[in-house]
Amino acid sequence: MLRPLLFALVWSLVVTGCEIAALALRGEALSGRLLGVIAIFATGSLLGGLTAWPIARLLTFARRRNRARACFAAMTLSLAVTTTAITGFLFYLQFAQYYGQWHTDRPSLRMLWETIFTSATSSYIFAVAGIRPLLPVLLPALLVAALAFARIEPRRSV
């Protein structure tokens, strides 16, 4: 029970550290907006790490042969997907909260239209401005995290 939490904390520290370094290299001044972005990445990566562990275990539950390889692949996939999805969703919530002041508050076709385009815009901005600068640094970290999971998990009884 402690290993998934420790794994998620380390993963969150790595992702948050990479985000802080990327912001510093771009010459961004520390502001409230940047602290919000850092908090989104920290929370998203923590929750992504916490959910990736049980998903990877579930994906390799019945696997008997080549379990270490399966654990590596399952953790690589689940950690990348959960971290990106949760962080992207948190980014969308912040984006929607900010732009919601100009949106209609009555349930209508216009509200649906505004929600769809707000989510599409936030997804695009998150992919271009949030993930792309971190990808070269986080890809090796993702593989190291998956390797650590693959070394720990096959020894545990299923």
Image (spheres, grey):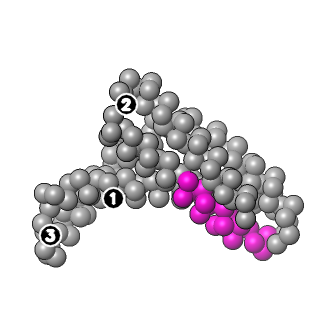
Q: Is residue 59 magenta?
A: yes
Q: Closer to the camera, 135 or 39?
A: 39
- In which image quadrant can residue 74 be found? bottom right
Is 146 positioned to the left or the right of 155 in the image? left
Secondary structure category for the residue under label 1 = helix
Q: Residue at x 69, y 47 (%)?
A: 145
SS state under label 2: loop
Res 106 label: none
Dominant secondary structure (helix, strand or loop) of the stretch shown in magenta:
helix
Pointer 1 residue:
93
Type of amino acid under label 3: Asp
Q: x, y percentage for residue 120?
A: 29, 56
Which stretch did the figure color magenta? 46-63
Q: Can residue 120 be seen by looking at this rendering? A: no
Earlier residue among tags 1 and 2: 2
User: Is 84 or 27 nearer to us in this picture?
Assistant: 27
Q: CA separation, marks 3 and 2?
A: 33 Å
User: Rounded to the nearest whole Å, what is the CA distance between mark 1 and mark 3?
Assistant: 16 Å
Q: Position of residue 121 (x, y in %)?
A: 27, 52
User: What label does residue 105 carry, if any?
Assistant: 3
Image mark for residue 30: 2
